[in-house]
Structures are given as C-alpha cells and as structure tokens.
Amino acid sequence: MRISDTVIRQLTQAARESDVRSQHAAAILDKSGKIMAMASNYHFHKPINKTNWLPEGDYTMHAEEAVYQKFMRQYPHLIKLAKLKKNIAYILVVIRIQRGGEHCIHSKPCKKCTQKINKLIKLNIINRVYYSVNP
Ligand SMILES: [Zn+2]
C-alpha cells in the first residue's frame, strides 16, 4: 500500500509542532489508509501524580508511543477486536522531518519502540510499519 500524500502532509505538520529537537510524528491508519490517531513526540516531566503531566522537561515521549497511547484512549474497543480478528490490524506510519526544512528524513524506530511495536504485531494490533527515510 502507498501512504497517501495527505497523510504525509498531516504528519509533516504534526512533526513541525513538536518541541523536541528531533521532530517526529506518527499515525495509526486503518486498512483503507484513513488516520485513526496521530501524535508528535514531545518533552515531559515525570508525573507528580498520575493525572498531571507537564508538557516540558527532560524526558521525551516518542511519537510511536504517543500515538499508540492516543489510539488506546480513543478506541479501546477496536483494539480488543483487532486482537480477536486476524483481518483488522492497523498500520503504523512514522516520519521525522528535517528541522526547518521541507524533507522527511530517516525515522527508523529506536530499540525501545521497536520492542513495543513487535509486541503490538504479535498481538495482531499492528501489522505493517512504515517509516520515512532520507531523500
Ligand atoms: Zn522510540
């Protein structure tokens, strides 16, 4: 499947809004290529209590993790369904943009995100992963 230009444009816009030096954005798409959830990476402080996260600080929430958390919050029933039915799995798209530039650059997930993604693949929630590469 080809990821549509519209999806890439929206991801590029989301990545531009990231406050992290290495600007990433990720989306979870359904089989038809429609965006179900989208998020960029961001900085945060460790939570003082479980409900309050400050949107700045030393820790970075990676785009892959951020988009999956959003997806889980919005569609818990779809995740349950995907685990049960083999033909429902979703698509993860990750991009990184060149800060201040026009192009996508290499965005292969880090080790921690790769482990997480592999788990989601095993659970039948995600079945394809696309990430941007250098032009
Ligand atoms: Zn990562």
Image (cartoon, rainbow, N blue to C red):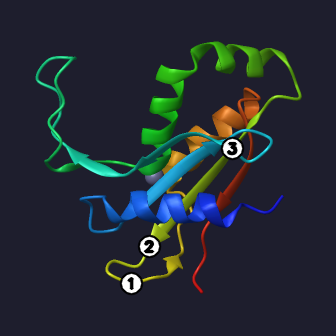
Residue type (three-letter) at the residue carrying disc 2: Ile
Q: Secondary structure at mark 2?
A: strand
Please, which residue is most extreme toward the bottom here?
Answer: 135
Numbered label attached to residue 34: 3
Q: Is residue 106 above or below residue 41?
A: below
Q: Secondary structure at mark 1?
A: loop
Q: Is residue 110 above or below residue 47?
A: below
**Is residue 86 left or right of 46 when viewed as pictured?**
right
Residue drawn 61% across the image and 76% down it: 133
- The residue where tag 1 is placed is 101
Numbered label attached to residue 77: none
Q: Residues within 10 Å of mark 3 (few under 14, many from 20)?
A: some
Q: Residues within 10 Å of mark 1 (few under 14, many from 20)?
A: few
Nearer-N-terminus badge (1/3)? 3
- The quarter holding residue 17 reads bottom left
Q: How far apart, in angstroms, are the residues tagged by discs 2 and 1?
A: 7 Å
Quick one: quadrant of the C terminus? bottom right
Nearer-N-terminus badge (2/3)? 3
* Percent of width and height locating residue 22: 34, 68
Q: Is the CB of mark 2 within 8 Å of ligand 1? A: no
Q: How far apart, in angstroms, are the residues tagged by discs 2 and 3?
A: 21 Å
Nearer to us of marks 1 and 3 is 3
Label tally: 3
Marks 2 and 1 in Cβ contact (< 8 Å): yes
Q: Is the CB of mark 1 within 8 Å of ligand 1? A: no
Please, which residue is most extreme toward the front here?
Answer: 6
* Percent of width and height locating residue 129: 69, 52
- The residue where tag 2 is placed is 97
Residue type (three-letter) at the residue carrying disc 3: Lys
Q: How far apart, in angstroms, are the residues tagged by discs 1 and 3?
A: 26 Å
**Is residue 93 left or right of 59 when viewed as pictured?**
right
Residue type (three-letter) at the residue carrying disc 1: Gly
